[in-house]
Image (cartoon, rainbow, N blue to C red):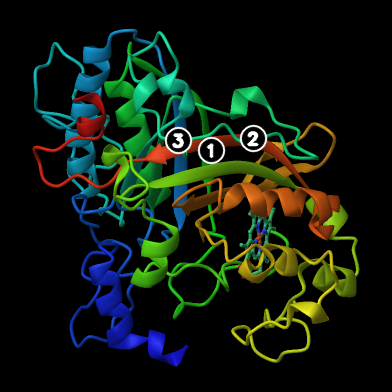
Amino acid sequence: MIAWGGVGLALGAATAGGTAAALAGDGTEPAAGAAGEAVPFHGAHQAGIATAVQDRLHFAAFDVTTRDRAALARLLREWSAAAALMTQGRPVGGGAFGGLAEAPPDDTGEAIGLKPSRLTLTLGFGPSLFAEGRFGLERRRPEALVDLPKFPGDNLDPARSGGDLCVQACADDPQVAVHAIRNLARIGFGKVSVRWSQLGFGKTSSTTPEAQTPRNLFGFKDGTHNIAGTDDAALTKHVWVPSSDGPDWMVGGSYLVARRIRMHIETWDRTSLQEQEDVFGRDKGEGAPVGKAKEHDAPFLQAMLPTAHVRLAHPDSNGGARMLRRGYSFTDGTDGLGRLDAGLFFLAYQRDVRDAFIPVQRRLARQDALNEYIQHVGSAVFAIPPGLRDERDWWGRELFS
Ligand code: HEM
């Protein structure tokens, strides 16, 4: 693991196209970069996937309300231009002030004076966008963009599920992420409306193995065994869509599963430490697998209970299936029953959901000891197209051409 630190890691991050200024000064800077920096918007893959995970999230799913295909394509062009500006810390269009006094300003203004904060904006297309009779896209729907099956225990709220489009905004400053979603929604007025949105904090998965692994709301390290944003071989094998999979417009893209998972933290907090550690198959302090001393020691899965989360989710139990997890914690007030509405907004990127999320979640939904303490309450899946090549490129250019 030590080899992941320093120069090797920084170079890896640069090739993954993830972080800006991965290697700074004397070369000892962490790959995550300083919180204020800008992440390049253009590249082979969209930023916000392999990018070192930022601290905050504002995720929004949109319904497309216009029936006009050309208007939708125009909007995606406008969104691309606005995203290119905002990710570099610049205001949209003519800015928030100094323009025509008679017209509303182009930018809403609340990010004035704030740094780019490593803002990334990642756009996706939901299955419903490809429905017959909408935009003539039914034949262009990727085979891999399947509707997720119903899993045992799901208690999905339709108002927090699905969506024609999604935008994942990640930044180290929550105001920067919220500003970005707000401005995209404003630009889309009359053509799209926000279907649901989710704020997140305290990234629950790390994609930078040199950094301290963050903890989820159950107090356990989360992201110990994840696909690193610096691991080009694993990204190529498990995350990016290759040309052999097709369709052409998705090559270099990925598929995103978003699940709003309620965590019953009050029940968890009354559970013994032993039971908590048995549920995951790792210890709480160090994060080491059962019977091992260190967090990154290779797990011996048979030493864990057959119902342990890590044993069930591990690639060795799933024919080698892997995904890049990039979730965030949330607390959204109370549930009206005296408990916090808290949990994990699970985000996972993969080359094909049929080989990764679906089989893994099937196993977890049936056997995971964690199910006593969690419930999946929202769900969505999106096709994430590849990155934009340059300023002339736009989200959906190949899909709509
Ligand atoms: C609230 C729900 C969940 C919590 C609290 C949770 C927590 C954790 C924790 C603490 C670990 C061990 C550290 C690590 O390697 O990251 C882990 C591992 C993992 N989890 Fe989850 N998880 C949840 C839901 C899910 C779901 C829905 C999936 C996918 C369907 C999933 C897939 C994985 C995978 C693939 C690993 C790595 C296993 C390995 O290779 O060792 N988790 N999770």
Q: Are marks 1 and 3 in contact (CB under 8 Å)?
A: no
SS at mark 2 in the image: strand
In the rendered image, the quadrant that contains the C terminus is top left
Query: Which amino acid is tagged 3?
Result: Glu
- For label 3, the residue is 143
SS at mark 3 in the image: loop
**Label 1 neighbour load within 10 Å: few <14, some 14-19, many 20+:** some
SS at mark 1 in the image: strand
Q: Position of residue 50 (x, y in %)?
A: 37, 61
Query: Residue at horizontal 18%, vertical 35%?
Result: 394
**Between marks 1 and 3, how big is the CA–CA gap?**
28 Å
Which callout, 1 or 2, points to the residue nearer the camera?
2
Residue 163 visible to the viewer = yes
Query: Which amino acid is tagged 1?
Result: Gln
- For label 2, the residue is 378
Q: Is residue 382 left or right of residue 291?
A: left
